[in-house]
Amino acid sequence: MNLKERVKELIDKGLEEHPDLFLIDYSVGGDNLIKVIIDGDHGVGIEDCVALSRAIEHNLDREEEDFSLEVSSCGIAAPLTLERQYTKNIGREIEVKTATASHTGILQTVSEGKITLEVTSRQPKPQGKGKITVTETFLLPIEDIKEATLKLKF
């Protein structure tokens, strides 16, 4: 078993002990730099990263492989990639880009590989001057989304 396969096995085992955490991505570089990015249903704390780091590091033999290990959370500005990430952000404002359009709205629901996005915008009145507020709902398959990010408010 190569190092990448062994690391994946250790990540899976470590995450079994923390069911609210899930893997976003991992890589093993040519210089044996192991990078693991995780997310959680209720966020990720330093103690979560430390626990997974220990689960990996304590089960790899430095006598066999010289490696460095980085375990981190995906970060608030990172794109949403998994359905589980969308689910944890229901009720929040997100920006979604597809091949044909871009929408910014409130994430309403997530189910069966699709999201419901409620978009409110100001549009010209059908007749006369002025604008009206229009709310539209879009049902988007997650597989059609090129990029989705949280809109941060300060």
Image (spheres, rainbow, N blue to C red):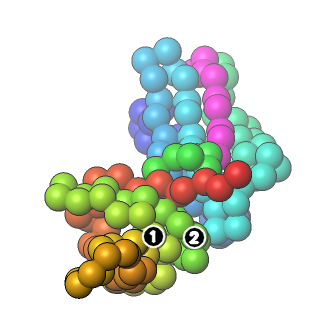
- The residue labelled by disc 1 is 105
**For mark 2, does the 10 Å Cα neighbourhood hold few (<14), some (14 to 19), or many (20 or more) residues?**
some
The residue lying toward the viewer, choosing from 57 and 102, is 102
Task: State the image coordinates of residue 149 (x, y, percent, origin top left).
Answer: 47, 54
Real-space Cα separation, disc 1 to disc 2, in angstroms: 8 Å
Q: Is 57 above or below relative to 41?
A: above
Residue at image coords 70%, 51% = 154
Q: In the picture, which quadrant includes the N terminus?
A: top left
What main secondary structure does the magenta stretch of the protein show?
strand
Label at residue 92:
2
Q: Indicate yes or no whether the magenta region holds residue 69.
A: yes
Task: State the image coordinates of residue 17 (x, y, percent, origin top left).
Answer: 70, 64
Residue at image coords 37%, 75% = 130
Q: Specify start and end residues of the magenta stretch as a single range.
A: 65-73
Amino acid on which disc 1 is placed: Gly
Which is closer to the viewer, label 1 or label 2? 1
Q: Indicate yes or no whether the magenta region holds residue 12.
A: no
**For mark 1, does the 10 Å Cα neighbourhood hold few (<14), some (14 to 19), or many (20 or more) residues?**
many
